[in-house]
Image: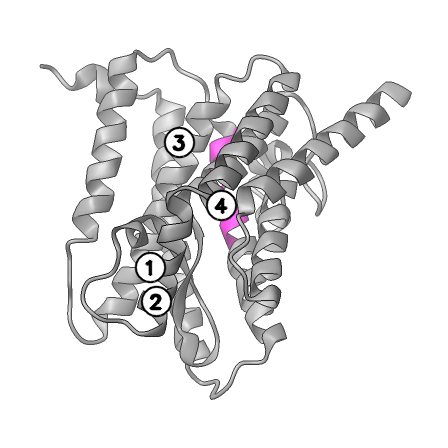
Amino acid sequence: MALHPFTTFSKSNRRLIFLLIASHLLWSCAVFGLWSTGRLFEAALPWWSGAFIALQLYAAAQLLLPVLLLHPEERSRGFYLFWGMTLALSIWLINQLTPGGGWQPLLTVVKSGLLLLVATVIGAALARYVHRLWEIVPVCIVMTLADLASWLYGPTAGFTREIKQYYLMPEGPPPLIDMVLIKLAFPGPAGLAPVFGISDWIMVVFFAIVARRYGVNDNLAGPAGETLAKQGRIGRYLPVSVAALFVAIVLAQVTGLFIPALPLIALIMLLWYAARYLLLRRA
């Protein structure tokens, strides 16, 4: 079977994809540098941890700018199946690497960068199938109910216990779910720890792309993300979905409880879209 239909992209999209890959690698290096700096702290105050998380999420938000400029291309189911299997295999393969010594933290942040990249691609692909803005309402409802059910009665509850036990008393190989958890740098002895999952970032990207497609400015720090991307300006993009994820993470850190991020992200985004819609109608 020829791979040409699966590996061919338009010239502009090809440039943006290369930019996405390079920027995610750069983000991983920055997280590694932040981890190295955090080791200088003997004990971390809660607000320092919050500052570290905010800085890394804000930097991750800038990674979304190139994807806002991607042009939709007609693709077959085979295309999505091929790249879905390829990306899943890449995540599995990188988790099979077990370097010793000081290489492990570097590999951990590279894994997190890869997960963000994969989530960005998936979120952008899913956003293509939203043909009307109101269609995000059932998406948010289903997403919230499914995540809450999994958290209360399904596999998420078990995964949470496994991850918590492993990071408190690491013995043996990490749980399988650890492969899709994104680790961020913390000051002090915590080092690199899982903060959110790949599904959370998929929905962050999904909402950012939907906002761009329907002309809703979701940037809390200034002009719309697409405008900033076209002007090549970084450092001023903070979509509402990223801020919602940060709120969920802070709540989990403050309460010491596992709080599913997806329902909170969905609620905040629905309120934001509703408010923007009402303002536009009034104008």
The image shows residue 70 at horizontal and vertical percentages of 46, 26
Q: Residue at x 63, y 73 (%)?
A: 47
Q: Which mark is residue 52?
A: none
Q: Examine the rendered structure and indicate whether residue 82 appears above or below residue 95.
A: above
Label 3 vs label 2, nearer the camera: 2
**Kind of residue indicated by mark 3:** Ile
What residue is rendered at 54% in x and 17% in y? 130
**Mark-to-mark CA distance, 1 and 2:** 5 Å
Please report the residue visible at 34 percent of the width from the left and 43 percent of the height from the top: 21
Q: Which quarter of the rendering shows the N terminus?
A: top left
> Closer to the N terminus: mark 4 or mark 1?
4
Mark 4 = which residue?
152
Picture coordinates of residue 132, whole percent (x, y): 62, 14
If you read the primary sequence from the N terminus, does the residue marked by circle 3 or circle 2 appear first?
3
The circle on residue 165 is 2
Residue 283 in view: no
